[in-house]
């Protein structure tokens, strides 16, 4: 199996670095791809579960645009709905009727939704959720989980990040995941000051295994929030519609006051949503939060068509089943080469790591070898699978996985020492 080369990528990146900070910034920055030499930086075209880079190499995509692609690039049901809406109107004066359809759909689908509000990015609705919680409670403090990601606004980023000032952190208290006593201690210490508890449905730190909720965790967190009048916010932006169409809180059996949604909603069209309980609807109506493009009708039409289709095929179940097949088979292949491949989280968005390799270099190298052969694997972030990954994609991926293990075995990297 030959491995990919990226000469055109190099030339394009050289031009990009001349006119764009960092060349490519944020989560697509080559700095997040280790080693960068193994990865394509630019996508020329995408279809189904695959994309093509500027050098003409094809990749089976296990990052799915870092979450938004859920039903396949260019999925006809989404593109047709988007195109039909585009012919009518998109960014106009006045909201489109499809906004009401989409809100009704979410309210019908999700037990935690009595109303819905739309924006563009996940961080928009996380910020809105925090504003609502503060306005509803008259309190300032936010409790979040150490190592959690909720976007890049100052308060959401950990201390020490560039451009984040100390004051951004003043009202934020971080506690470990799965630590109910730590939350109780915060509620005691800051009695009457905590506006909200915010967390993802299960913990997805970068550079570390995903961690599921301990038995009874969410029940206890919910009970504490209710007892202390703290608004319970679930950041379901990454997990949402990859565990359950009714929301990840339904999957884990609890009832948040506010749920932030985004990534998988519209199969790549820019839209996010905050859904919430009746008791917070009037607060949500009076907190001013908006944006120039938040009423765009095309992403709303795309989201409506996408969510309906995902519900019809039970897309989360399709991804969970297909992912379980793939990742179980990968673990077996790893064993035949003498490696212990750890898979954590759910199979629709798992985190993978080769065990007994604290340096993570072996795992990085294995991901790089897979990517160079056409299966896009990143080493330090959870992966994603979509409902568009076919049996043929999975079969080809397993062949690449085998070759990638063979390649690292041949190099005698640190684990062998
Ligand atoms: C859990 C979580 N919260 C918030 C965000 C921020 O979303 P966005 O990048 O759309 O602002 C993300 C981004 O992927 C996320 O994974």
Image (tube, rainbow, N blue to C red):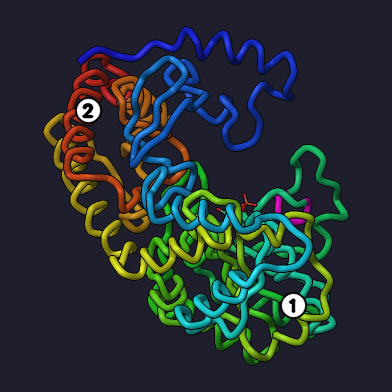
Query: Residue 267 location, x and y as percent?
Result: 47, 52
Give percent across and percent down for residue 76. Answer: 38, 50
**On-image quarter of the N terminus:** top left
Mark 1 lies on residue: 133
Residues in magenta, as a range: 154-158
- Which residue is pictured at 31% across the width and 25% down the height? 374
- Taking depth in this image into account, of 327 and 110 the one nearest to the observer is 110
Q: Magenta stretch containing residue 378, yes or no? A: no
Which residue ends up furthest to the front in the rendered image? 87
4 is higher (above) or lower (below) than 350:
above
| Residue drawn 67% across the image and 58% down it | 296
Q: Is residue 235 above or below residue 367?
A: below
Residue 238 seen in this snapshot: no
Check the image and report above or below for 68 versus 14.
below
In the image, residue 302 above or below residue 218: above
Report crowding for label 1: few under 14, some 14 to 19, many 20 or more residues within 10 A (C-alpha): many
Q: Can the viewer see residue 357 in this picture? A: yes
């Amino acid at each position: 199996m030959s491995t990919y080369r990226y000469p055109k990528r190099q030339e394009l990146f050289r031009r990009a670095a001349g006119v764009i900070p960092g060349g490519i910034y944020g989560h697509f920055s080559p700095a997040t791809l280790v080693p960068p030499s193994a990865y394509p930086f630019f996508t020329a075209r995408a279809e189904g579960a695959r994309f093509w880079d500027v050098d003409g190499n094809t990749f089976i995509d296990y990052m799915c645009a870092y979450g938004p692609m859920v039903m396949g690039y260019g999925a006809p049901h989404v593109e047709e709905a988007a195109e039909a809406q585009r012919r009518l109107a998109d960014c106009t004066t006045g909201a489109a009727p499809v906004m009401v359809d989409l809100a009704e759909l979410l309210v019908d689908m999700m037990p935690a939704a009595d109303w819905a509000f739309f924006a563009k990015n996940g961080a928009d609705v996380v910020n809105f959720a925090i504003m609502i919680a503060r306005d509803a409670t008259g309190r300032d403090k936010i409790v979040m989980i150490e190592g959690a990601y909720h976007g890049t606004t100052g308060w959401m980023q950990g201390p020490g990040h560039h451009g984040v000032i100390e004051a951004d952190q003043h009202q934020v208290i971080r506690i470990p995941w799965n630590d109910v006593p730590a939350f109780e201690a915060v509620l005691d210490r800051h009695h009457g000051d905590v506006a909200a508890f915010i967390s993802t449905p299960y913990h997805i730190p970068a550079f570390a295994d995903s961690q599921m909720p301990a038995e009874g965790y969410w029940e206890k967190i919910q009970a504490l929030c209710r007892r202390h009048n703290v608004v319970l916010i679930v950041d379901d932006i990454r997990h949402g519609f990859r565990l359950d169409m009714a929301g990840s809180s339904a999957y884990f059996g609890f009832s948040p006051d506010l749920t932030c949604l985004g990534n998988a909603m519209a199969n790549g069209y820019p839209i996010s949503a905050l859904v919430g309980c009746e008791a917070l609807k009037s607060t949500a109506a009076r907190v001013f939060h908006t944006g120039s493009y938040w009423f765009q009708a095309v992403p709303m039409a795309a989201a409506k068509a996408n969510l309906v289709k995902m519900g019809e095929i039970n897309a989360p179940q399709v991804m969970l089943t297909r992912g379980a097949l793939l990742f179980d088979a990968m673990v077996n292949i790893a064993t035949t080469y003498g490696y212990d491949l750890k898979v954590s989280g759910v199979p629709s968005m798992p985190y993978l790591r080769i065990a007994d390799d604290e340096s993570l270099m072996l795992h990085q190298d294995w991901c790089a070898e897979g990517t160079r052969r056409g299966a896009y694997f990143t080493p330090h972030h959870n992966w994603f699978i979509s409902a568009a990954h076919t049996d043929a994609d999975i079969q080809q991926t397993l062949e690449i996985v085998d070759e990638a293990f063979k390649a690292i075995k041949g190099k005698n990297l640190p684990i062998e020492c």
